Image (spheres, rainbow, N blue to C red):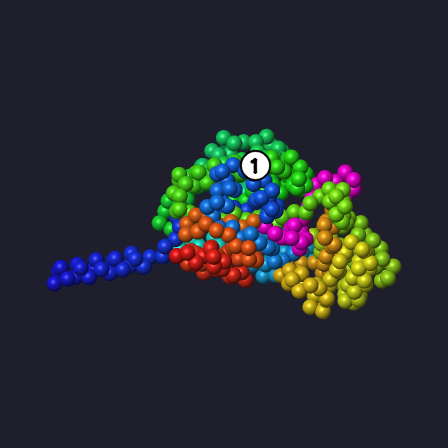
């Protein structure tokens, strides 16, 4: 009888063991700020074998991954990657947006303190994010045993991907010259971060974000987190969210085709190759699931386009709003009826409207009529009347997805192709982003590692498809505002 009982217990244990959910030891999310999809191939012949080429040669590339909302900016892009959602639902309506009638920065939190410096750079948290992230869902699924950590130079690029329940997020304090966090996560820096900062202290004020040294610093910090937090070494799956921020600032300054941008991407390729080697050594080849994408792309410099007889230009948002307000003052007798023009979106001055007892719909219609006379604008849309506006269906969907009722602007302008939100004179050599167009909205997406078979697809996928795909592979619930679809070619490899 005793032998039978022991045999039964062993059988039950074996069945339980077999029934355990199979997951990778570690998930790594890599976001490259302002990386156009075509950079994969524009620089391909100059990349080494171990970085981007390795991803393409070993991983699965989604060649037509599009952003399905506008505006295409950093905070929204990082949030949408990890939530599988759009501003209408996850609430991050821009790097800056309107909240209770006032402009706010997406991550600023007056109720938390800087940890690691005495500067305000650490007063940040994800409290404005309304949705959960992949990391949040992973923590929930493992009874909060998984570790989730975010690393980036930009605060929003570390905080928003990691989510609410993250163990930590670390970002760069320019004034201090090292990484910091906030009291949202902890009361003091871990010893390993303090040591890392001491060993890698930069000159206070040095602009790490505008230098290729910032790319190296980002990966050094990511590797330090990997090793010191023992990510991928426990009994549950951990997650490391890494964003490369300098590529954005360098591109803003130098555009898309100058040597400085090339140098940044070749440095990134080198650092990526080393990072993959470290993952192989620390976690084990085939034991980690990695994806690489971007928060948005970027337009080619308008002056360079015009030099090749390609239509392009730019508009001065401040000057445009001033002209609009001058026109509205003549019409309604009230000054400054619009008080903010940001990322192609105009915000109405609710206080001035109420004080003058004006009908808001009449003011908006007059504004639409006036702005529509500008030949650089293809469409001018009152967002509360979007459904009644004649627009291409895909563009209408992008505008709707990007519009948050309580946080977004009131009137959206849609520019002609390659007309950017910047004051473009003959000296302008940089670029920007935010628009719906493919140059801003077509981003790379490559999965590599655990359970990923080599290949590619040319079918349309979207930025919001990343989160449900990863969650499907991990067998965890997708984030609570997710509207994306699982990419079957990636996930169906069990």
If the image is split into quadrants, where does the C terminus sit? bottom left
The percent position of residue 253, horizontal first and vertical second, equals 68, 39
Is residue 87 shown above or below 271? below
Which span is picked out in magenta?
424-443
If the image is split into quadrants, where does the N terminus sit? bottom left
Name the one closer to the observer, 367 or 392: 392
| Total marks placed | 1
Would you say 1 lies left or right of 272 here?
A: left
Q: Secondary structure at mark 1?
A: helix
Whether residue 441 is in magenta: the answer is yes
Residue 436 image-quadrant placement: bottom right
For residue 32, say whether it is visible: yes
The percent position of residue 11, horizontal first and vertical second, equals 22, 60
* Residue drawn at 32 percent across, 59 percent down: 19
Secondary structure predominantly adopted by residues drawn in magenta = loop
Would you say 379 lies left or right of 43 here?
A: right
Would you say 92 lies left or right of 224 here?
A: right
* Residue drawn at 56 percent across, 36 percent down: 46
Name the one closer to the observer, 358 or 159: 159
Is residue 12 shown above or below 238? below
The percent position of residue 51, horizontal first and vertical second, equals 50, 40
Whether residue 156 is in magenta: the answer is no
The furthest residue to the left? 1
Is residue 281 shown above or below 15? above
* Residue drawn at 52 percent across, 61 percent down: 485
The furthest residue to the bottom? 388
Would you say 44 lies left or right of 424 here?
A: left
Residue 429 image-quadrant placement: top right
* Residue drawn at 73 percent across, 42 percent down: 304
Dot 1 corresponds to which residue?
46
The furthest residue to the right? 330
């Amino acid at each position: 009888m005793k032998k039978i009982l022991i045999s039964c217990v062993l059988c039950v244990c074996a069945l339980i063991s077999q029934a355990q959910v199979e997951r990778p030891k570690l998930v790594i999310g890599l976001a490259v700020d302002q990386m156009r999809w075509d950079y994969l191939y524009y620089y391909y012949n100059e990349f080494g074998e171990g970085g981007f080429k390795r991803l393409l040669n070993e991983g699965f590339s989604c060649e037509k991954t599009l952003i399905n909302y506008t505006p295409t900016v950093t905070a929204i892009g990082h949030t949408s990657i990890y939530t599988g959602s759009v501003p209408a639902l996850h609430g991050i309506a821009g790097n800056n947006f309107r909240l209770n009638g006032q402009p706010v920065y997406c991550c600023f939190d007056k109720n938390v303190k800087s940890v690691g410096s005495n500067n305000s750079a650490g007063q940040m948290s994800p409290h404005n994010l309304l949705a959960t992230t992949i990391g949040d869902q992973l923590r929930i699924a493992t009874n909060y045993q998984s570790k989730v950590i975010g690393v980036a130079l930009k605060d929003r690029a570390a905080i928003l991907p990691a989510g609410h329940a993250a163990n930590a997020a670390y970002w760069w304090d320019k004034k201090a010259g090292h990484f910091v966090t906030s009291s949202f996560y902890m009361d003091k820096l871990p010893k390993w971060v303090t040591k890392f900062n001491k060993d890698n202290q930069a000159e206070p004020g040095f602009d790490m974000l505008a230098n290729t040294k910032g790319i190296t610093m980002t990966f050094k910090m990511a590797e330090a987190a990997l090793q010191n937090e023992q990510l991928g070494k426990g009994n549950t799956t951990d997650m490391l969210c890494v964003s490369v921020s300098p590529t954005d600032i360098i591109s803003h300054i130098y555009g898309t085709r100058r040597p400085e941008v090339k140098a940044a991407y070749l440095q990134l390729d080198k650092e990526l190759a080393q990072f993959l080697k470290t993952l192989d050594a620390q976690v084990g080849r085939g034991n980690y699931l990695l994806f690489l994408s971007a928060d948005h792309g970027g337009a080619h410099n308008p002056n360079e386009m015009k030099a090749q007889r390609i239509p392009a230009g730019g508009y001065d948002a401040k000057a445009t709003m001033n002209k609009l307000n001058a026109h509205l003052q003549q019409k309604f007798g009230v000054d400054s009826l619009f008080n903010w023009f940001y990322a192609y979106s105009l915000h109405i001055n609710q206080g001035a409207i109420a004080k003058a007892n004006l009908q808001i719909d009449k003011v908006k219609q007059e504004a639409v009529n006036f702005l529509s006379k500008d030949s650089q604008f293809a469409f001018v849309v009152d967002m509360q009347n979007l459904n009644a506006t004649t627009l291409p269906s895909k563009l209408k969907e992008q505008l709707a997805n990007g519009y948050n009722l309580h946080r977004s602007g009131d009137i959206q302008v849609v520019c002609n192709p390659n007309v950017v939100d910047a004051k473009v004179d003959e000296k302008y050599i940089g670029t920007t982003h935010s628009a719906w167009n493919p140059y801003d909205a077509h981003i790379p997406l490559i999965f590599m590692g655990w359970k990923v078979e080599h290949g590619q697809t040319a079918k349309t996928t979207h930025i919001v498809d990343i989160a449900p795909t990863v969650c499907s592979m991990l067998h965890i619930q997708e984030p609570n505002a997710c509207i994306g679809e699982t990419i079957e070619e990636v996930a169906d490899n069990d």
